[in-house]
Image (spheres, rainbow, N blue to C red):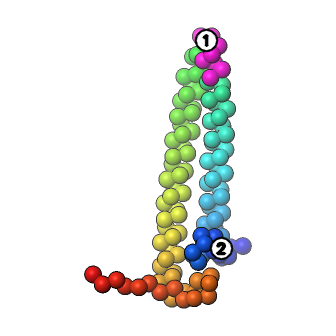
């Protein structure tokens, strides 16, 4: 599978399978964190509705955990964005070198006059 390419963007751009695996791994991490956040939010709501002092005190820690999870999701999306940009830059550099696209046509960039 390594070294395989996918042309999943619909415009002839090829993506390395390693990049796709990295994206999938990151999206699974994000989804797991979001699932955990849903459980945290439910527990926070139940504690709040109960108005029991110990439960309300416990919410402080739960809300901190929720905030940390949100930071992790933001970081993961930032890393994904950066990785995607780098892979697209590398892909477009490959196209400009005359590499063959998935449609069988050589990729050449047009130079625009300044």
Work out how far the residue at label 2 is from the one at label 1, CA to CA, in angstroms: 54 Å
What segment carries the magenta color?
Answer: 45-54
Q: Which quadrant would residue 59 be assigned to in this image? A: top right
**Residue position marked by numbered label 2 in the rendering:** 6
Callout 1 secondary element:
loop
17 vs 106: above or below: above
Callout 2 secondary element:
strand
Please state the horizontal and vertical placement of residue 12, each as a whole percent of the image: 59, 77
Residue situated in front as seen by the camera: 69 or 31: 31
**Residue shown at 53% from the left, 69% from the top:** 87
Q: Main secondary structure of the magenta part?
A: helix
**Residue position marked by numbered label 1 in the rendering:** 51
Quarter the C terminus occupies: bottom left
Circle nearer the N terminus (2, 1): 2
One can see residue 70 in this view:
yes
Please state the horizontal and vertical placement of residue 41, each as a whole percent of the image: 62, 29
**Residue shown at 59% from the left, 27% from the top:** 62
Please state the horizontal and vertical placement of residue 45, each as a whole percent of the image: 62, 23
Residue situated in front as seen by the camera: 14 or 111: 111
29 vs 107: above or below: above
């Amino acid at each position: 599978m390594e070294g395989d390419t996918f042309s999943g963007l619909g415009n002839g751009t090829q993506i390395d399978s390693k990049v796709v695996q990295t994206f999938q791994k990151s999206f699974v991490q994000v989804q797991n964190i979001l699932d955990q956040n849903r459980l945290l939010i439910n527990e926070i709501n139940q504690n709040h509705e109960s108005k029991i002092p110990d439960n309300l005190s416990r919410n402080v820690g739960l809300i901190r955990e929720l905030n940390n999870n949100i930071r992790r999701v933001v970081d993961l999306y930032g890393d994904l964005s950066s990785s995607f940009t780098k892979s697209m830059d590398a892909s477009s550099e490959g196209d400009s070198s005359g590499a063959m696209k998935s449609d069988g046509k050589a990729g050449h960039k047009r130079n625009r006059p300044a």
